[in-house]
Amino acid sequence: MIRVLAFFLCVFSGTLATAQQEVIYHVVTRSFFDSNNDGIGDLKGVQQKLDYLQELGITTLSLAPIYQSEFYHNLYAADLEKIDPKYGTFKEYRDLIQEVHRRKMKLYQEIDLQFVSTKHLWFTDSFKNTKSIYSGYIYYTDVKNETPYLLPEIITYKNTKEQVVALNLKNAKVAAHVNKALKYWTDPNGDGNFYDGVDGFTLHNMTDKLDNSGKMGNLLKDFWNSLFTNLKKTNPKLQLLAQPANANSFGKELYAKAGADRVLAVKLRDAIVSFDKAKISKAADSTFLHLAADKFPVVYIENEDTGRFASATGMDAGKMRAGAALNLLMGGVPCVYYGQELGMKGEYLKGETDGNRIPVQQAFEWYADDNGPGMALWYKETGPWWDNRSMKPNDGISLEEEQKDLNSLWNYYKQLIHLKKMQPSLALGTYEEVRSDSDMIFSFTRTYKGEKMLIMINLSGTRQFTMLGVYDELRLDRLKLMLGAANIAFPRGGKGIELPPYAVQVWRFLP
């Protein structure tokens, strides 16, 4: 029997959800809900939709970058301590986070600390000026401050040209300033009461070295670990999530060297999207195996750096449900990208313009006709990104349509999330792959304190039969169906099973 083990420790933190019981919702504020009719989603709009998120079963919001920036996606900040005024005021941000905490939810911020906009004061003051007090803050490759380490020029969706520059993360003053900025967001008024502070950060594209010169290497230990250690001194419960810059990383170096609490499971995501059982099995092994009890992978199937799951080749309703089950039931901390629960579509395009990110950051579809109060259509009439938008009126993909349909994808996500939260083994349990003779049926158990759940997922669009070699007998009188078709039987002495296309079956073993 192939066993893939990952142990999860239940660590309660006051009345807030434990790590394993969390379900993260990744929100692009600009595209979520517009509270003031200017076409741009905002922080007040997010606050107005907290009822919706709680109805879905979400425990934690993860905000895509909201810092002041020349870029619409706000990834490269011009000021790490200021909110982009398009999203609202600091008071509106504080109102949001206090309401989140009043509801016993959490809020994380996403941030990139390796690159800043060339509009940032540190660059504008130090470029070609070695006497600047910020001279050592930017990573220059020459002594005259004339050759900064730049990413390739970016053409914005508004057809302007912008660049981003690397910070000198080896500079102690930079490290101190970054620590000060993140400490500010952790405890804005410095009173040691974190009701108005973030519960965690997602660090975008974390890497151990910025280039191959050797000058900006060993960053996980020298910069990130030091930063994380200092932030934990401010709030020991702060959660630090790492997104690997290396697409082939399983994150072990980010846990061990940097001290990250969680790492986005990039390779597992790629495996899930492939619907290849062997790849999923191998990636799950590398993602979950040998983790310390307080380390958790973040399991996801889409975000702003990938195409929408619903737009993957060969996608259909059944496949989207199977993907949702893999996202939410395997283990770790599941993360749902805004609109994923509706099956929103959009493909990440390649090219020099940042407008090619817009297809995966389109407005959340609240209404059947894609019009109505709060629609964040900030990209309206912007050319190809508007003309070729994937959102279509009355196509069955909207909250208005799907809430009414008990068989909708939205209702399926809601069902999965609530099942996960109600069953301790699905929230806290050990993951163990179950061997079968089918290349198309992926099976695993989740076990916690004597409660065991069996999950079986058909990864194909055809009926599949498999023999299970794990248990001496799988009898219906020993299993309670928690999710799936009620007419599934175990023939051949209880060791075989036939599943419909993309079926998801969840059973709880009876004592």
Image (cartoon, rainbow, N blue to C red):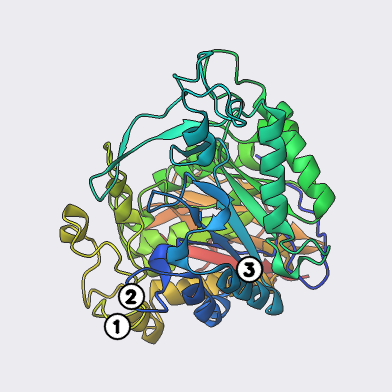
Q: Residue at x 49, y 57 (%)?
A: 457
User: Disc 3 versus disc 2: distance between alpha carbons?
Assistant: 31 Å
Decide which of tag 3 and tag 2 comes sooner along the chain: 2
- The correct choice, above or below, for 405 with respect to 299 in the image is below
Indicate the position of residue 20 as horizontal and vertical percent values: 70, 59
Please report contact status of discs 1 and 2: CB closer than 8 Å, yes or no. yes
Could you say which disc has been placed on residue 64 in the image?
none
Viewer-nearest of labels 1 and 3? 1
Image quadrant occupied by the C terminus: bottom right
Identity of the amino acid at label 3?
A: Lys
- The correct choice, above or below, for 213 with respect to 77 in the image is above
Viewer-nearest of labels 3 and 2? 2
Q: Judge the density around disc 1: few (<14), some (14-19), many (≥20) Cα neighbours within 10 Å.
A: few
According to the picture, the residue beneath numbered tag 3 turns out to be 420
Element class at badge 1: loop
Between 400 and 351, which is closer to the camera in this rendering?
Answer: 351
Element class at badge 2: loop
Could you say which disc has been placed on residue 375 in the image?
2
Identity of the amino acid at label 1?
A: Gly
Element class at badge 3: helix
Between 484 and 32, which is closer to the camera in this rendering?
Answer: 32
Q: Judge the density around disc 2: few (<14), some (14-19), many (≥20) Cα neighbours within 10 Å.
A: many
User: Disc 1 versus disc 3: distance between alpha carbons?
Assistant: 33 Å
According to the picture, the residue beneath numbered tag 1 turns out to be 372
Indicate the position of residue 202 as horizontal and vertical percent values: 60, 49
Q: Is residue 410 left or right of residue 493?
A: left
